[in-house]
Amino acid sequence: MWLPILTVVILGVVPLALVVSGVVSGIRRFLVLSVSAALMIAAIIATQIPLGEIGWHPGTVRQALPWYLGFAVVGAAAIYWYARYKKINPLREWRQDPHFWFWFMPISIGQQFVFFGFLQSRLDQFLPTVFTVAFSAVMFASAHVMYRPRGRTFAMTLFGGLGFAILYAV
């Protein structure tokens, strides 16, 4: 019972708290979150968690992929619509941002693995599904508050995290 709780706190909550609080800033945020993800992978290997248990079985991926892609497209369209409505140009300097050049897809896939495959499956061991979904969504949104404006970013990624957490739970 205590191992999943400690795993979530040490590998999920603590790194996010360091990033969100500003204790870790700049490129170190990426490093802290990358080390956290690497430790989660090491925990999966060390404790021999079956990949199917965390949603990474080929059959599960094939079944879920259309739903995740569909939700991602709807989410991207919603962000685009919201940005136009608020007259925000989120892509103004995207060509100069290495995050979008090199890291967007690996980080996005990694987020699904980290927040919903590993952490949510650990939370499922000691929390009811509704709390697991809510907690996963808050953690997902917290990982994005490094991007400004923080309040708007948190709100938008909270909805995205909630959608992805629900997709993972069903």
Image: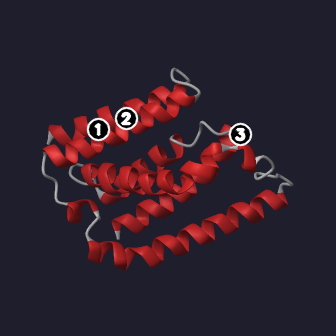
Query: Disc 3 to disc 2, how far (Cα)?
Result: 26 Å
Tell me what residue is drawn at x 63 percent, y 44 percent: 98
In the displayed structure, does residue 129 sit left or right of residue 22?
left
Query: x, y percentage for residue 2?
Result: 16, 37
**Residue type at the position of mark 2:** Val
Q: Quadrant of residue 99?
A: top right
Of the pair 102 and 149, the residue shown nearer to us: 102
Mark 3 or 2, nearer chain start: 2
The residue that disc 2 covers is 35
Q: Is label 2 in contact with label 1 (beta carbons under 8 Å)?
A: yes
Q: Mark 1 sits on what residue? A: 39
> Tag 1: residue type?
Leu
**Percent x, y of residue 51:** 22, 61
Q: Can residue 150 be seen in the rendering of this structure?
A: yes
The relative height of residue 56 versus residue 7 in the rendered view (above or below) is: below
**Would you call the spot at circle 3 few (<14 residues within 10 Å), some (14-19), or many (20 or more)?**
few
The residue pinned by badge 3 equals 149
Instruction: Return the residue nearer the eye: 107 or 129.
Output: 107
Q: Secondary structure at mark 2?
A: helix
Q: Secondary structure at mark 3?
A: loop
Q: Earlier in the sequence, mark 3 or mark 1?
A: 1
Amino acid type, label 3: Pro
Using the numbered discs, state the Cα–Cα distance from disc 2 to disc 1 in whole angstroms. 6 Å
- Asked if residue 86 lies left or right of residue 101, the reply is right
Residue 35 at x, y = what percent? Answer: 37, 35
Residue that appears at 83% across and 55% down? 86
